[in-house]
């Protein structure tokens, strides 16, 4: 992903403190963690793109929440719908780690009208802008919680979510604190027994980061899956892999395979055996070991 450059003052939109924009307005906005840019989609009169610190983050179609412009989001949606078919109208309990423009949360609200969702966003000002720009569903259907994703996850009651989606990036990669075995165990505890943990894993062609993510998820969950396009799976480019872990089997869903192959960027599925073979020999990520306490000096 692009590194953050110097801020540009061109197109800056000043919003009075304590107020929220009434609908999307193109421009650069200062937020708590830097700046974001809202750009109208030139190919879609109802579409808006959101950049955060120079990196493309989200796309929203104001007229159609079921339209997902980013391919990796379509893969996530297909996977979730394979586990919980829409026609069954499940009361899905979802936790989104990483907010952006709340594209996935809007999608699931439209796909599962009775879903209860929480989106965790580190940047409070960004969360407030997004609320104003995109007219998101109100609580309790969708709550935006400002906070650090790991701290929020660790504070939640066990067995209270069906779905957790980790889509948090600082530059090109997810912060390490959200990728370790210890954090993944917290996510596992928050999930219901048949819950689904999904991560967006970004990596370079060496796939070093993806292998570590896969090893850590496979060490935590009984069943795993990877969805990605063939070029990414073969280590030919930088891109995204969608990884998932669960204690319930994924099964062999031909509908899911057809959906993934039929997209603009056809994707393949790696089952649990392939995921574990891919991760073989890669150390599981762990939290840093705290340094030992300094030895106390006996009082004289």
Image (cartoon, rainbow, N blue to C red):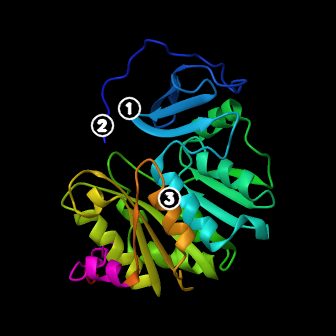
191, 279: nearer the viewer: 279
| Picture quadrant of residue 206 | bottom left
| Residue 275, horizontal then vertical, whole percent | 34, 78
**Mark 3 or mark 2: which comes first in sequence?**
2
What residue did someone put label 2 on?
A: 2
Task: Pinpoint residue 195: horizontal percent, then vertical percent.
Answer: 61, 77
Q: Nearer the viewer, residue 200 or 292?
A: 200
| Identity of the residue drawn at 74% across and 51% down | 110
What residue would you read off at disc 3? 75
- In three-dimensional space, the C-alpha distance between marks 1 and 3, rounded to whole angstroms, equals 24 Å
117 falls in the magenta region: no
Q: CA distance from mark 2 to mark 1?
A: 7 Å
- Mark 1 or 3 closer to N-term? 1
Residue lying at 76% horizontally and 61% vertically, measured from the top left: 115
Residue 286 makes an appearance in the image: no
User: What is the residue that sits farthest to the top in this orientation?
Assistant: 10
From this view, report whether residue 177 is shown above or below residue 195.
above
Foreground label between 1 and 3: 3
Vertically, is 45 above or below 64?
above
Q: What residue sits 33% from the left and 53% below the top?
A: 173
Upstream in the sequence, badge 2 or badge 1? 2
**Magenta-tinted stretch:** 273-296
Per the rendering, the mark at residue 54 is 1
Q: Which of these two is toward me, 249 or 104?
A: 249
């Amino acid at each position: 992903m692009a590194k953050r450059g110097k801020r540009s003052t061109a197109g800056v939109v000043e919003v009075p403190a304590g107020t929220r924009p009434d609908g999307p307005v193109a421009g650069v906005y200062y937020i708590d963690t830097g700046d974001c840019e809202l750009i109208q989609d030139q190919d879609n009169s109802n579409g808006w793109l959101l950049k955060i610190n120079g990196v493309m983050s989200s796309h929203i179609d104001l007229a159609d929440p079921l339209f997902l412009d980013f391919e990796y989001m379509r893969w996530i949606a297909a996977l979730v719908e394979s586990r919980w078919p829409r026609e069954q109208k499940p009361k899905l309990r979802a936790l989104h780690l990483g907010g952006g423009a709340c594209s996935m949360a809007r999608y699931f609200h439209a796909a599962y009208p009775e879903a209860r969702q929480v989106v965790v966003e580190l940047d409070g000002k960004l969360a407030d802008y997004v609320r104003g720009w995109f007219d998101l569903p109100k609580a309790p259907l969708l709550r935006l919680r400002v906070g650090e994703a790991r701290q929020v996850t660790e504070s939640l009651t066990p067995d209270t979510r069906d779905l957790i989606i980790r889509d948090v990036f600082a530059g090109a990669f997810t912060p390490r604190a959200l990728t370790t075995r210890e954090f993944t165990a917290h996510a596992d505890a928050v999930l219901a027994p048949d819950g689904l943990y999904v991560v967006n894993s970004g990596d370079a062609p060496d796939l070093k980061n993806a292998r570590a993510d896969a090893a850590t998820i496979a060490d935590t969950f009984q069943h795993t899956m990877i969805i990605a396009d063939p070029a990414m799976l073969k280590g030919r480019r930088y891109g995204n892999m969608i990884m998932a872990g669960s204690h319930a089997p994924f099964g062999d869903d031909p509908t899911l395979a057809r959906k993934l192959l039929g997209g603009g960027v056809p994707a393949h599925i790696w089952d649990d055996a392939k995921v574990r073979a891919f991760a073989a020999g890669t150390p599981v990520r762990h939290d840093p070991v705290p340094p030992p306490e300094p030895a106390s000096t006996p009082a004289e």
